[in-house]
Structure formats: C-alpha cells, structure tokens
Image: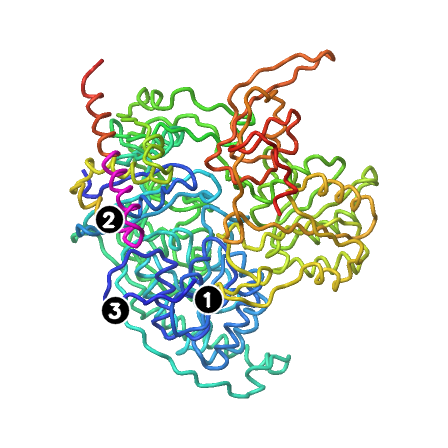
Amino acid sequence: MAAVMPAPAQSRLLMSGNEAVARAVWESGVKVAAAYPGTPATEMLEVISTYPDLYSEWSVNEKTSLEVAFGAAMAGSRAFCAMKHVGLNVASDALMTLTLTGVAGGLVLAVADDVGLSSSQNEQDSRFWGRFAHVPILEPADSQEAYEYTKLAYELSERFQTIVILRLTTRICHVKALVTVGERVPHVAAGFKKEAARWVMVPGAAARRIPLMFEREGKLREEAEVTSINVVESGEGGKTDRRVGFITSGPAYMHVRESFPNAPVLKLGLSFPAPFEKIRAFAATVEHCVVAEEVEPLLETELKAQGIKVIGKEILPRQGELAPHVLKPAIARLLGEEVPKVAKTLPPLPVFPRPPTMCVACPHLGVYYTLSQLRNVTISGDIGCYTLGFGHPWNALDACISMGASMGMALGLDKGRGAAEKDKKIVAVIGDSTFLHMGMQGLLDIVYNRGNVTILLLDNRAVGMTGGQDNPGNGRDIHGEEAPRVDFAKLVKALGVKEERVHEVNPYELPTLLKRLREETKIEEPSVIITNEPCVLITDYHKLKPFTVIDDKCTGCGNCLDTGCPAIHVTKRDSVVKPSGKTVDLAWVRIESSVCTGCGLCVQPCAPDAIVHADTVAKVSVMQRH
Amino acid sequence: MSEITNILVVGIGGQGVMTATEILAEAAIALGHDVKKTEVAGMAQRGGVVSSHLRFGPKVLSPQIAPGEADILLGFEPAEGMRWAHMLRPNSMALMNTGRLTPPVVELGLFEYPEDPVQQMKEAGTRVYAFDASAIAMELGDIRLGNTVMLGAIADQLPFPAETLEKCVLKRFARKSEAVIEQNRKAFAAGRAAAAAALKGEAVPA
C-alpha cells in the first residue's frame, strides 16, 4: 500500500482495533514494524505500511518478525511486532530469551487471540506467555483503548526495559468504534551499545539476568497496584448492587458492563502481573467476586492461590466469548434467580450450512479435483485457502495442524505407515507463503531422511487466505514495490530434491497435472510439483472470456460440479437406473457467466462438450490461454 | 426500551455486507451517535456466512447484538435472512433481497435450499418485506450495486433522515466518475422505492 496523509490530531475516526493500534504505533514514533499476516492481526501491519516516517515489512514468519523488531529495540529505536495467537508459538523461542536481555528502545508485541475460533486452528490464550516469559500484558477493551494502551505500552516498555505484550482478541481487532487520535511524537534512537553481558545470552550471562527479570516483575506488580488503567468502577448512576462484583479485562469488560450496569467492576488494563492487593480489597467489598476472563482461568487460578475468594470457570465457560447472553444466565444461576430467557427470541430456522468455499476459477480447484481422482493416497495438508480441500466435493485433504506441518506429518506418515499401507502414496500439499514460513525445513527433513513423499507446492504468488498479501514468493514488498523473488524450483533443488523430480505445472491443465502426480507418487523418493498460476484475487490474475452451457448438449453427468467451482449451478435434477441396476443421479447445470472468469477448468471433464465460450459456439482449448 | 438501536445486516462474503454496515455506521456517527460495528465468526471472504452487527446510541458498550434483540434485519440473501431471523425481537422488521445465491453444498445435492425462506420467516413471527434487489442492481447495470439498493431500502426505517444515509453512500464514491455516482444515486432511490412498495403491499391485506 502507498503512504497516505494521516488524519490530523483530535480527529474522531471510526477505527477497528487494528487500525487504532496502527495509528498509535505511528504516533509513538516507532521506527521499525514487522509482522507475518494472520487473521485477525493482519490489518495492523497493512495499515502501518501506509503511514510515513517508519520502516515496515512483511517478515517470512512470526519468529523473524519478532527478531527484526527486537533488533531495532536493541538499537534504541521504538519497534513493533504483530501476530496472531499461534504466531507467538513460532516466535516464542525469541521471546523466552529476549525477556532476559530486556530492551533499549520500546518494544511492543501485539498478539491477537481468536476467541471463538472465527478463522484459526485453536483458541489458545496468549496471556500465558506473559506468565511464562515474565513480561507485562495490557488488555484493551475497545478501539479507543487499543489506541491508548499501545502508547502506554511504549512508556512501560522503556521504563521497565522489557517487551510489553498487547493482548487483543478478534472482538477488538475487527470491531469498529470511534477513536480520538493525537499527535505524532518523534522518537530518537539511542543507537546500539555493545555490552556482551547484556545482549549475548550465554549461560553465565543469562544466569545473571534471571534475578533481574524477577525483580522487574515485582516492580511491574507494584505498578499494576497504582496504574490508572486498573480501576474500580461502581454501578451506574450511583446504584451499586454489591451481590456480585466482577474482575475483568479486555472485551469481557464491555460485556460485563452491558449485562450488569449496577455491578461493581475492577477493570484490569494491565492484567499481568496482577495487582493482588487491589483485588483483595475489591473482593472484600462484594458478596460474590466473579473473574470474567477470556478464555482460560489464569487470573482466577492465581487469585485462588493468593487465598482470595473468587468464582470463575465454575460458572463461566472455558471456551468462547463471554458475551451478555453467556454471562447473564450464569450469574442468575449463581444468585439462585430465575434464568432469563434469551429475550423472547424467535425459534432458529433450519438452513443449510454455508461453509467458506474456494473462489470461482481458483487455481487450487484443479489441484483438488485431480487429487480427488487419486486412489490409495493420504494427503497431508497445511494452513491456507487450500485447507478447504478437505471439504466437498473434493474430500482431498486428510490432516492439518500448523504452519508447515504438512511436510513433517507426511514424512511421519511415510515412516510410520501401517502394515496394510505398504503401497499407500503420501502427498503433502502446501502453499507458497506457508512453505517459506515454516515448510522449507520440513522439506529438508524429508530429503535428508530419504522420505517417500510427493509434495504439491501451490505457488499462487500471495498469502491468499488473509487477503493476498505480498511475500518473498511474488517479488513484491509490503508497499507493493519490487523485491527479490524466490525461485521455488531452484530453492527445492538446493534443499536436495533431484533435478528430475522437480516439475512446474499449470494447475488448469488437468491431464498434465494428473499424469505428473501419478508418475511422481510411483517413484519412491521426494518429488516436488510446483503449480504456477496466481490467486484470482490479486492483480497478477487476468480474467478470460466467460463460459456458458449449451442446454441441449448438457447430459446431466455432473462432472463439472466435481471441480467445486462456485460459478456452476444446478438447473434440474433427476436419477436414472443404469443397465447394471445402479441408480445414477443426474444434474443439469448452467454457468453464472457474470462471475465466470474463463479458466476453462470445467470444460475439461465435460463429457458432451456442452461448455463453450459465452460469446461463441466454438469451443476453445484451455491450452490457448497463454 | 433501550436507547440503543441494533441493526443486523446479513448475507454472504463478497456481497458488500460489511461495507454497507460501515456506511450505516458513518451515517449514525454523522448524527452524533456513539457506534460499534462487529462481524460474527466466519471466513467471510470465501463465500461464507457474514452477519454484521451495528449498534448505535448515546453510549455503546458491548459490540454484539444479543439473540432476540435486533431491531431490524437487512438481508442480502433470503436463506441468510432466515438463518439469522431468530436474532430479531419478535414482530420486528426484516427487509429482504429475494435474489438467491446457492452454495456448492446445495449444488452438489448434499443440502436443500429452503423452498420459501420469506414465507418461513413470516410464519416464525417476523414482519418481512421482500423485493429482488439483485435484479434491480442488474437492471441498473452492475450486480455490485446490490448493497446500495439494500441501503436505500433501509433508509426510511432509521431514526434519522434518509438523506443522511444517501450522503454517506455517495461519499464512498466521491473519487469515482460522475457516472458511478449517478448509478449509485439511482440504486439508492430504487431501493427506497422497492421497500416502500413492499411495505405498501403488506399494509393492504390480500
């Protein structure tokens, strides 16, 4: 994205939490900002890249992004790093030791938890990292706080010389609310000061830093007792109902306030280290003290260990958001009151599911269509749009856990195969950006340990699922400017895959793709098939002339539907009994020409040649698309 | 009851649901309201379910509309309107596009598309006013005008003047050609007219 003129100070803007953090990063005089895209955190760096006066980058993965930001902070600059919750697992190796060195310039790590799993593989609670790494955690409750806490995080970071974690959730990142913004204050980098005992974490030096880390944690706990963002609020309009008081943080605070306007609330902005004395005093003023935290009982467990009487996950769920319709019945039950019916709601009506689909003409469609034709194969999958290949109509992805795992899992499936699976083919499917993020090492493992795996490297030149961000595979940087581009064929050969086992294939050429896959899965050594057509959502993609179906020619075979292209719609259904006695379902189709981009995928399996260009009757071979 | 207005906008990824809700939010802000807008779970971008919550009033706390507390539903697709109808207060209004979008799971014969979503919503206790916003948009030359048509449809049901909303819609296209602005002006007017006709039709019992 190109730089734009930031809105003037005192503007009141409708901003998502991500946009609010980005603005605060710019105002704080940050010099270096780095991230790898990941929902719901992606927009922070996307927006930061549009601000002037700072360096921003898409890093190759979350670990490198944190190391880049930390390097800048060692040099005395203010630095920023953003990632989704699972990204911090990847970056944690750096985190667990940079907590010992501390920082020179302010370093803020915004980590976005996907409470409610809108687009993630798990729901882990990043507040654990604060406890694990002994670093402070700030938890904003809306966009305005996301903005304010980010600025405060830089003050704390420099005052206590530590990285600060800004813990967001989907309900902060993607909610839009009004934010009043301020002025940018430039920050001058002090420069890197050579000091081996501080920055070189060999055992002796690290051992001397550990007591300092604990001392810092103690001081931060004192800060938590006095900071203005840890605040006791009484009920609205002076009417305070002391039967239940809440200790809460983040978006749960808003839900508590919404649900119980008269309840006393201790809102924790700096939630770790927790202010035990403030909490002890608060708990003494209410009958029941309830900890409302998303999602794990972290604070609750600590408070109970402190001998403070609180209630938490005994009455509240340990999964998902603590929305008003979750909180209200739980508290009613606690008080022995009648559980309020969820308003006088209408009955939910039964509707088919509408799972996310791959796009019209997506280059992955051909890959999964082809994979679905293979028999006796186990498909090890990865994180990205192509994870959707597990679903209908392909059912052609058998496992998916974490970024890059398709490689290691495939090797394990090969080496650990059961007695009956002697001839089973193992295929791994991974996208370009995921491969660069964490897949390369797994491929090296496959090659080095002589695994029998066929790898499909789907190079669509974008981080597709998060919105088509640039990466080293497409040769453009975060601003869309030209950058060195990875040559995937050369890269996999450099990792040891034999020259003759590396193939580039156009994923729209189904016969070639099938032939290659059949050949390579037969050969008992690592091979890599690279598909080379771009994501349909990025500018590299060029639309072609749309197709249509000649009604008279369509025989209802339904082969085209097996591609999974969402532009194909059924107009009529029937079933016939074949001479063999088998009943076959028939479905006649039409193509929605207004969305068809002419990839020609559905033309290939069409038995009666009923699919033609909308503007002509002559069938055009897909081979002519280039 | 509450001073907060809860508007639920639903449809599928790619229909412009989130943009439409944001424009509604901008109109509410222009009139001095506090505003929060949020989307409920789902990988919206990939043809999945999108339900966008807008709450505005003097001071908004939770961004989420609780089940049974939506004041009005703007449905960009009939089955999606049906999916979220239970979020409405009983006897509330739903403004519905009748233009259907069938997902691959239905095309594959794994699930059936409901026969008459609008009728089923009515039977469940929602006041439904339906019109073919997709057809109106196509007639005006571009299916993407559908969200402007839908915003036109809700314009006379808000606690502020329709003109405020229209201004916010057109502001979105300020940098586009005069032809695009004119197209959207027409789409907004057509949406208003379609909703008015549907409301009139409903008022007179058949």
Q: Is residue A521 above or below residue A85?
A: above
Position of the N terminus of chain B by quadrant: top left
2 vs 3, front mark: 2
Secondary structure type for disc 3: loop
Q: Quadrant of residue A108?
A: bottom left
From the top left corner, tell me how far across and down residue A607 is, in percent: 66, 26
Mark 2 vs mark 1: give the one in front: 2
Task: Report x, y in % for residue B29.
Answer: 22, 51
The residue to which callout 1 is attached is: A109
Q: Are marks 3 and 1 in contact (CB under 8 Å)?
A: no
**Residue A294 vs residue A123, the one in the foreground:** A123
Q: Nearer the viewer, residue A171 or A467?
A: A467
Nearer mark to the viewer, of 3 and 1? 3
Label 3, on which residue? A9
Disc 3 to disc 1, C-alpha distance: 25 Å
Q: Is residue A427 left or right of residue B96?
A: right
Tell me which residue sits at (70%, 15%) in the image. A582
Chain for numbered disc 3:
A
Residue type, label 3: Ala
Q: Which mark is residue B168?
A: 2
Residue type at mark 2 is Cys
Q: Residue at x 43, y 41 (%)?
A: B13
Q: Are marks 2 and 1 on the same chain?
A: no
* Magenta stretch in the rendered image: B169-190
| Same-subunit check for callouts 3 and 1 | yes
Tell me, yes or no, whether the highlighted magenta stretch contains residue B182.
yes
Q: Which quadrant is the C terminus of chain B positioned in? A: top left
Asked if residue B122 is positioned above or below residue B33 in the image, the reply reads above
Q: CA distance from mark 2 to mark 1?
A: 36 Å
Residue at disc 1, secondary structure: strand
Determine whether label 2 and label 1 are within 8 Å by CB. Answer: no
Q: Residue at x 62, y 55 (%)?
A: A432
